[in-house]
Image (spheres, rainbow, N blue to C red):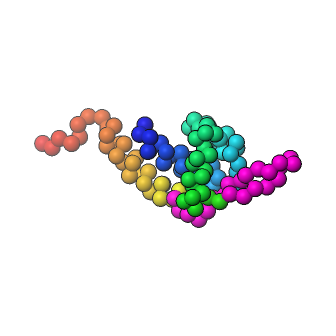
Amino acid sequence: MDIQMKRGLLDICVLAAIKDADSYGYQIIKDIKPHVEISESTLYPILRRLESAEQLTVYSAEYNGRLRKYYRITAAGLARLEEFKNEWKEILSIYQFVTKEGNDNEKV
């Protein structure tokens, strides 16, 4: 898969993982892993990039006596998810065109 496309899809997966509830790194990895393989070394740069793009915010909260970083999606992050859904319709249409059986393009 093209590296830029995969990078964009991973960004979307991270946003989707925190869409319904704030989460932390390890949990995000667990939530995404059934769908796509992602490591900590891949996740944390994505989280920083999404924070820089103001698509998520970060806050710390105590958990079992230690501070844990939590990530919360912003309105811009939600808007990016909606944009992706619309873009995906076009990508799906292209995929269906490329993979269709037969030669329906010939005109008699």
Give 69 or 81, whichever is nearer the viewer: 69
Q: Image point 57% across, 35% down: which residue? A: 37
Q: Image point 71% across, 48% down: which residue? A: 24
Which residue sits furthest right? Answer: 65
Q: How many marks?
A: 0
The quarter of the image holding the C terminus is top left
Where is residue 67? Give x, y as percent: 80, 51
As drawn, 75 above or below 13: below
Where is residue 13? Give x, y as percent: 56, 47
Q: Image point 53% across, 56% down: which residue? A: 81
Which residue sits furthest bottom? Answer: 75
Give 93 or 102, whichever is nearer the viewer: 93
Give the dominant element type of the magenta stretch: helix, strand or loop.
Answer: strand
Q: Image point 17% across, 41% down: which residue? A: 106
Read off the magenta span. 58-80
Give 19 or 105, whichever is nearer the viewer: 19
The quarter of the image holding the N terminus is top left
Which residue sits furthest left? Answer: 108
Residue 75: in magenta span: yes
As drawn, 79 above or below 38: below
Tell me, yes or no, if residue 47 can be seen here.
yes
Where is residue 62? Give x, y as percent: 82, 53
Where is residue 99? Give x, y as percent: 33, 37
Residue 54: in magenta span: no
Tell me, yes or no, if residue 21 can be seen here.
no
